[in-house]
Amino acid sequence: MIKASFGFTRAELAQFRRLRTPVRIQQFLDEEVGYNKETDGETCRSPRRVLRDRTAHCAEGAYFAAAALRLLGHPPLIVDLVAVRDDDHLLAAYKENGFWGAIAKSNFSGLRFRQPVFRSVRELVMSYYPHYFNLSGELSLRSYSLPVNLVRFDPIFWMTTEQDLFEIGDYFYSVKHFQVLPAHFEHRRLRADRRLFEAGFHGCV
C-alpha cells in the first residue's frame, strides 16, 4: 500500500500501485523498462523520468527501485558496489523480517534481484561476487558501501525532478567502502566460472 505521494501525480501513483512487492518492482524493471545504452554520464534520470521514458541504466534503475520501495513503506536505501576494470553497480536494498534483499537494473542476469534471505549487507554483496565480471571474464567486484538513505536528497526532489541526479552519484565517492577480498587477493586477476560467465549474458540487450 502506498503511504504517501512524495510529489507524484495520481496517474503516476496508479502505475506504482501495480508494483506491490519487491519482486513486482524487479519484474517491471526487467520487462517494461529498456536498458539505457547512452554513454555513461549523459543522463541520470529521476524515478519520475524512468516511469515516463521506460528506459534506465544501473543507477537510474536503482533510484527508481528505491522510490518504489519507499512508496511501499521501506526506506529508500542504495548500496554502492565498486569494481576494477569494470563498471560500478548500484543496488536498491531492502529488509524483510530482518533479512536483506536487493533490486537492481543490469544487462547481466546475475546482477539483478536478490530475495531477502541475507543476514547482513556483506552477505548480500558477496552473493553478487561470482556473477560480477568484466567482458574479459575477470571477477571485478572489490568494495561496497553500507546502505545510503536517499532521504538525504529529498531537498533536490530526487524522486520527481526533471533534472539529472548526478549529485547522488557524486556523493558515493565520499562514502566509506569496505573491501570484499582479503588483502593478498586484492591484486590477483581471478577468473569467473565459464558457465556463470556464459549465463551472465542471458537476456543481455
Image: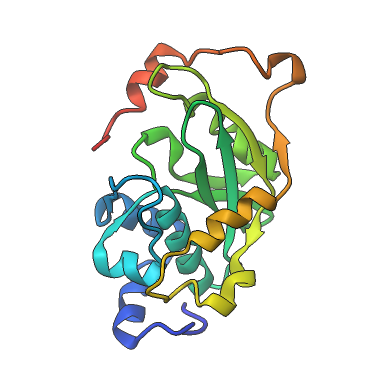
> Is residue 165 rendered to the left or right of residue 144?
left
Q: Is residue 69 visible?
A: yes
Which residue occupies 74% across, 14% down?
A: 184
Q: Above or below — where is 197 with respect to 77?
A: above
Q: How are the colours assigned in the image?
A: rainbow
Snapshot quadrant of residue 162: bottom left
Q: In front here: 175 or 178?
A: 175
Q: In front here: 150 or 98?
A: 150
Q: In front here: 69 or 164?
A: 164
Number of numbered discs = 0
> Is residue 63 rendered to the left or right of residue 50?
right
Q: Above or below — where is 89 with respect to 167?
A: above
Which residue occupies 42% across, 76% down?
A: 160
Which quadrant holds the C terminus?
A: top left
Percent coordinates x, y for residue 88 in the rendering: 51, 39
Percent coordinates x, y for residue 110 in the rendering: 42, 33
Q: Is residue 94 visible?
A: no
Q: Above or below — where is 16 with respect to 120?
A: below
> Is residue 81 rendered to the left or right of residue 197?
right
Q: In front here: 39 or 29?
A: 39
> Is residue 181 rendered to the left or right of residue 57?
right
Which residue occupies 46% across, 14% down?
A: 193
Percent coordinates x, y for residue 76 in the rendering: 57, 65
Percent coordinates x, y for residue 180 in the rendering: 68, 30
Q: Above or below — where is 17 with respect to 7?
A: above
